[in-house]
Amino acid sequence: MNEQFDSPLFGTPVAGTEDSDGQAPRRSAMIRTSPLANHAGDLKSLARRRLPRIVYDFLEGGSHDEITMRRNRADFDALFLRQRVFDHFAVRTSQTSILGQRASMPVGLAPIGMSGVFYPRAEICVARAAAAFGVPYCLSTLATCSIEEVSAAAGGPFLFQLFMMKDRAINASLLERAAEAKCPGLVVNVDTAVQGRRNRDLDNGVTIPLNLRLWHLFDLVRRPRWVVRYLGNKPTLANLAPYAPGGKDLASVSDWAEPRFKGAVHTEDLEWLRQQWPGTLIVKGVLDPEDVKIALDLGADSVVVSNHGGRQLEGAPSTIEMIPRIRDTVGDDAELILDSGVRSGFDVLKALGRGANGCLVGRAYIYGLAAHGEQGVAAALHLLSQELDEAMTLTGTASVNALPENLVFGPSSSG
């Protein structure tokens, strides 16, 4: 049976149940919803109401005119799943292995920097929900809770994502801290040689330093719950604060860190990381088949095919468009994880059908976090799992590890 989040919050799992004769159910089980959300749109709507505009736009926005960000969704929507009405399986499984870990479904929670602006102690909330649900979570270098804090509270292993710094000693220190926390995998971002210009943030005055305006204050007055939580938590870049002399708050540590990020990651940097890191090495932010091949040749165990959620190169192709081309180049043995644009369990099955081994989600779980904290992340995972099981049922898919032929088709089916 497809694993569900085993919590009183969601009741007893029913997906994949059998009749007494061992056959598939003769009628569909009642749709189970959580008290927190009937569907993912509920979480997004509540996140929008609870967050100040500048914070919500920071989450929701992409680079420049957001063409790439919209393309991520449009290309998913243009694909079709092959509906099968006579091939139903009473028992379905979404269990698999991704990013070097067993997972209850082929989904991981992507690293999101400065998550503490969405909810207090955000990364601890996310790590706990991910561990309880049985999916991988990746902690960002730019997290507002430190590696050590998350390790002490998470309840399970988590990956660490590295933004490389110019000072290799700081990189080595971060790797040592991740190893001491027993992180099983290291994710290195390679798509931020420069930061894409994000027009929403510029229009909102989200710069270093922050350009406060009068309308910001009126907006904050309308969201007293967020203000109280933020002031009570006062997040900072907790992983980098120990290296910033005198830097404690978010603004001062950000100001210290910004000129010290390395930016472009070269092949010699990956070679150094492969020598330094004994665990699983995951390269994130690759979109071209030749770059994926280079990363694998340099020792990467997995590659995350990503355009940074449409927040970097404006005019880049969508990841769901590029996955088949990359798969054709690198063959079946390479682990390819799709990131950018994934919002539902239906998207996850489409990605698998196009050649991905799994997906990372970002905004989809942050909506839940901003709405309800740890329980909101759990609700988002529950909805993803339920949608995936529904998609598997209606396409005659018994296992995410053995997909039916011609599962996905549409304008991009030729690859």
Image: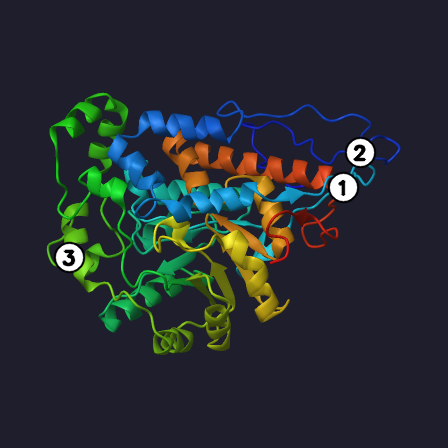
Relative to 146, say whether 120 is above or below.
above
| Nearer the observer, 72 or 391 | 72
**Which residue type carries mark 2?**
Glu
Query: Mark 3 and 1 residues: CB-CB less than 8 Å, in contact?
Result: no
The quadrant in which the C terminus is found is bottom right
- The residue lying at 45 percent from left, 56 percent from top is 306
Q: Sequence order check: which comes first, mark 3 or mark 1?
A: 1
Q: Position of residue 387 (x, y in %)?
A: 61, 36
Which residue is under mark 3? 256
Q: Earlier in the sequence, mark 2 or mark 3?
A: 2
Query: Which residue in the structure is indicated by mark 2?
Result: 18
State whether residue 27 is above or below residue 301: above
The residue under label 1 is 91
Kind of residue indicated by mark 3: Trp
**Residue kind at label 1, given as amino acid type:** Val
Determine which quarter of the picture holds residue 271.
bottom left
Q: State the separation of the CA atoms marked 3 and 1.
A: 53 Å
Q: Secondary structure at mark 1?
A: loop
Q: CA distance from mark 2 to mark 3?
A: 59 Å
Q: Residues within 10 Å of mark 2 (few under 14, many from 20)?
A: some
Classify residue 109 as left or right of residue 66. Answer: right
